[in-house]
Each structure stands twice: as structure tokens, then as C-alpha cells.
Amino acid sequence: MESLKQILAKYNLSLKKAFGQNFLSDEELLKDIVEKAGVTKDDIVMEIGCGAGALTRHLASKAKKVVGYEIDTRLKPILSDMLAEYNNVEIVFSDVMKVSLEQIEKKLGGEYILVANLPYYITTPIIMRFLENAKNIKGMVIMVQEEVAYRLASKNSTSDYGAITVAINLRGEAEVIINVGREKFTPPPNVDSAVVKITIDKNKFAGVDLKKVREVVRIAFSSRRKMLVNNLMNGYRIDRQKAEQVLIKAGLPLTIRGENLSAEDFVNLSQVINEKD
Ligand code: SAM
């Protein structure tokens, strides 16, 4: 098989930094990602950012069906060559952020796993979008900057913990499964990366109005250094007495900060705030 460098030279393709084009070519690493993602012949996979198709090929060899989204139409000839032997792959040449989730999920046609070596500039919007709005997602296996990976998988009361961690914990849980040094990419980026696996549990907080919980989370992290009581006062336009009553009713100390609360605490707090007096 031709190396990535040979393929890029053959097609005279210069990689675009603006699209986060750092490509993988280490076959062992690619195999490892797909294996740890747990992709089987029954699975539908969505891939964001197919690049030269290195990961797409491995996914296609294990999955029932792969639908990939790639913004850069210059990659069309490379991808059609690289994927010629697979008839279970479809590549959509679009900016994935401009395609509606409804359309994406319709095309996927059932429950799916999102697997992606994400361009770093859209990491957070992609993760939030799928966590908050996707209906049929079973899990995500995503390569992100190492420091972001640890943030996604962090525990409350640590400095890494933030609103995105809570968003994950409201739907499932995250773990860092593979560390990837910058030298594994062509060209090497300025930072190391890691693969995070997010397992979605459909029954987690079933029946809870997650929209309302997300509102509390947003308010709790609106000013990270402030105590929760102050953020509640500003966010809900209530006086200190009322905000303290809410915390007492939720069984939380008056001095607590948003970063100390688990997803369960946020669900409980949201129920207290939104109950009719
Ligand atoms: N999957 C390949 C690999 O592992 O070698 C490429 C990964 S590279 C980090 C990210 C890819 O995402 C690039 O091919 C880039 O063109 C594509 N991309 C960037 N922004 C995108 C967007 N908004 N929608 C779809 N693809 C995008």
C-alpha cells in the first residue's frame, strides 16, 4: 500500500491548516482506535472529517455501514481510490456543521457510533451538538487534544471539570482510551492528542427535563470563580435569600461552586429550582 506521503504527492495535495488537516497513517493505531471503539458488523458508523480515508478504511472493514462527512472537496479523488474496495461507505462532501442533525440521522438510518479524528476548532461545538440534540447516538469515539480529553473525562471538584463534562455525564460517561503523540500525525500538530470514548446511556436521567438542567449548568459555570449562590442570583434574577433557600433545599452547602457539583447534583438542583412554590 502507498504511504500517506506518496498519496499526497501523487495527488499534489497540500494540507490545509484551516481545516485542521493533520492526518494519521499509523496502521496499528488506526486498528486500535476501531477495536477500542467496539465497532462490529452490526454497527452503523458516522465519521466526521475523513481526510485521506485512513480511519474510514478501518471503519468500513469492521462496520455494517459508514457515512463520512468531509468539508474539503479536493479529497474526492483520494477518497474514492482509498475506499474503492468498500461498498458500505458513503462520503458526503459538506461542512458537517451546516447539515442538520435530522438530515444526518436520516441518512444514517438507525442507531450509530460517531467516530472522528476531529479538527480541533470544532471539537466542542460538535460534542455539544450531538450530546444535546442527537436522538440515535450510541457512543462517540473521538480524537481530541490531550488536555481536552482529560477535561471531558474529569471528575467534579477537579480543575479540569467544566460545563462540557457535565453535559457528557448527563447522557453517559467518558474515558480516555488511547494517548497519541503528536509525531503520529502528518504534519505533526503543536500538541499531543488522546482518544476519548463516550458511552451514551439512553436510560440515564430518563424522564428528567435535561433542557432545564442544562440551563442550571450554564448559569453555574457562567462565572467560574464565583460561588454558586451568586451565579444563581444573577442567572435567575433572584435575591440572596431565595438563592440560599434553593441550595438548602437541594442539600448543598451555601459556599459551594458549580465545579463541585456532579451531574446528579445538577439534576436535583434543577428540580428544586423549577418546582412550583
Ligand atoms: N480522519 C483523517 C485521519 O485521521 O487522518 C483526517 C483527520 S483531520 C484531523 C480532520 C479532517 O476533517 C480533515 O480532513 C478536514 O478537511 C475535515 N474537516 C474539517 N472541518 C470539517 C467540517 N466542518 N466538516 C467536515 N469535515 C471537516
Image (spheres, helix red, strand yellow):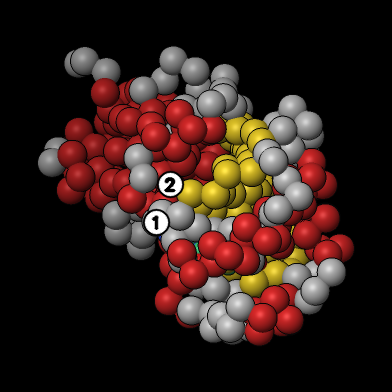
Element under disc 2 = helix
Q: Is mark 1 within 8 Å of ligand 1?
A: yes
Element under disc 1 = loop
User: Which residue appears at 59% of the width and 27% of the height?
Assistant: 111
Q: On the image, which quarter does residue 271 sit in?
A: top left
Q: Nearer the viewer, mark 2 or mark 1?
A: 1
Query: Could you say which disc has been placed on residue 140 in the image?
Result: none
Task: List the residue tagged with mark 1.
Answer: 95
Residue 268 placement (x, y as % from top left): 42, 27
Task: List the residue tagged with mark 2.
Answer: 128
Separation of residues labelled 2 and 1 (CA atoms): 17 Å
Q: Residues within 10 Å of mark 1 (few under 14, many from 20)?
A: few
User: Which residue appears at 79% of the width and 41% of the height?
Assistant: 62
Camera sees residue 254: no
User: Which residue appears at 35% of the width and 62% of the height?
Assistant: 225
Answer left or right for 241 relative to 212.
Answer: left
109 in relation to 119, above or below: above
Answer left or right for 112 relative to 162.
Answer: right
Count of numbered circles in the view: 2
126 in relation to 241, above or below: below
Q: Quadrant of the C terminus?
A: top left
Hey, what amino acid is under mark 1?
A: Asp
Residue 46 placement (x, y as % from top left): 58, 43
User: Which residue appears at 45% of the width and 29% of the height?
Assistant: 106
